[in-house]
């Protein structure tokens, strides 16, 4: 299974046309922050910094680092690690309306990076369909894309992450209304009928320090 997943990933990357490094290793050019706590206190420490050539999400205050540009039909390669304590973070694709959920999260489809759950989908005022939907999302009557609804769609495997402190590679392929996710070469999620097909990208500050050394977008 893992060999087939890796072969599929290699085929996907081989089909890509041009690549763009979205993080230049020096500053946050091409990105902007949306951090609700900074509305009332603009002097609060920023939760996203560049340190030793790495993009670091400090986790607090909570919010998002959002790309200035919008994208469609691409693969996104992200290399990340929880350098200290395990915790929560995520990559949001097809992001649009700011603070659409809980006055915090932009309308989007989240690809979970939380330690132990990498590759889960979280629906944030957008939706997606996967095989075995009820076993992975819960009873159908509880499904939804807003506050209080069952928005989590579990991944296919929870044993694809590297040990804490080691670098993980996540690849997200967004093409038309489908999204595929690999973690360290394993296909961990695949969905279709996504209700958005383009938008901004975002990285979360969600309580834990996470380091990123690579964020590369490749057009399909």
Image (cartoon, helix red, strand yellow):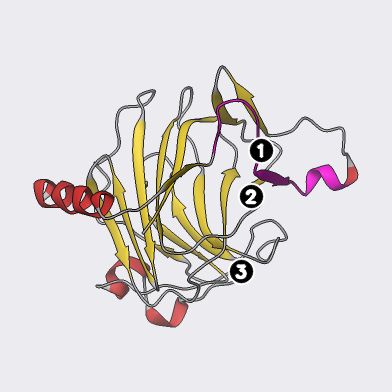
Place residue 160 in its image quadrant: top left
Query: Mark 2: which secondary structure?
Result: strand
Query: How far apart in space, not on screen, are marks 2 and 1 (Cα)?
Result: 11 Å
According to the picture, the residue beneath numbered tag 1 turns out to be 29
Near-viewer residue (140 or 49): 49
Query: How far apart in space, not on screen, are marks 3 and 1 (Cα)?
Result: 32 Å
- In the image, residue 159 sits, relative to residue 102, either above or below, namely above
Residue 66 is tagged as 2
According to the picture, the residue beneath numbered tag 3 turns out to be 147
Question: In the displayed structure, does residue 76 sit left or right of residue 52?
Answer: left
Query: Mark 1: which secondary structure?
Result: loop
Q: Residue 119, can we see it?
A: no
Residue 83, given in percent of the width and then of the height, sits at: 46, 23
Residue 28 falls inside the magenta stretch: yes
Circle nearer the N terminus (2, 1): 1
- In the image, residue 34 sits, relative to residue 152, either above or below, namely above
Mark 3 or 2, closer to the camera: 2
Near-viewer residue (218 or 210): 218
Mark 2 surroundings within 10 Å by alpha-carbon count, few (fewer than 14), some (14 through 19), many (20 or more): many
Circle nearer the N terminus (3, 1): 1
Q: Residue at x 82, y 33 (%)?
A: 44
Residue 69 is tagged as none
Mark 1 surroundings within 10 Å by alpha-carbon count, few (fewer than 14), some (14 through 19), many (20 or more): few
Residue 212, given in percent of the width and then of the height, sits at: 49, 32
Start and end of the magenta stretch? 23-39
- In the image, residue 179 sits, relative to residue 171, either above or below, namely below
Query: How far apart in space, not on screen, are marks 3 and 2 (Cα)?
Result: 22 Å
Which quadrant does the C terminus fall into? bottom left
Mark 2 and mark 1 in contact? Answer it, CB < 8 Å: no
């Amino acid at each position: 299974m893992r060999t087939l997943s890796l072969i599929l990933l290699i085929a996907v990357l081989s089909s890509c046309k041009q690549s763009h490094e979205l993080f230049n290793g020096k500053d946050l050019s091409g990105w902007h922050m949306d951090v609700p706590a900074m509305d009332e206190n603009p002097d609060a420490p920023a939760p996203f910094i560049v340190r030793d050539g790495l993009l670091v999400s400090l986790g607090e205050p909570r919010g998002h680092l959002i790309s200035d540009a919008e994208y469609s039909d691409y693969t996104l390669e992200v290399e990340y690690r929880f350098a200290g304590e395990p915790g929560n973070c995520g990559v949001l694709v097809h992001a649009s309306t700011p603070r659409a959920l809980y006055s915090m999260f932009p309308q989007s489809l989240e690809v979970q990076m939380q330690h132990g759950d990498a590759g889960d989908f979280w629906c944030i005022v957008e939706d997606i369909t996967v095989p075995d939907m009820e076993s992975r999302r819960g009873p159908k009557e509880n499904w939804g894309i807003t506050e209080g609804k069952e928005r989590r769609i579990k991944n296919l495997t929870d044993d694809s992450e590297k040990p804490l402190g080691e670098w993980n590679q996540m690849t997200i392929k967004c093409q038309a209304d489908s999204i595929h996710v690999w973690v360290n070469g394993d296909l961990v999620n695949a969905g279709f009928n996504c209700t958005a097909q383009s938008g901004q990208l975002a990285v979360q500050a969600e309580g834990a320090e996470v380091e990123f050394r690579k964020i590369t977008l490749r057009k399909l």
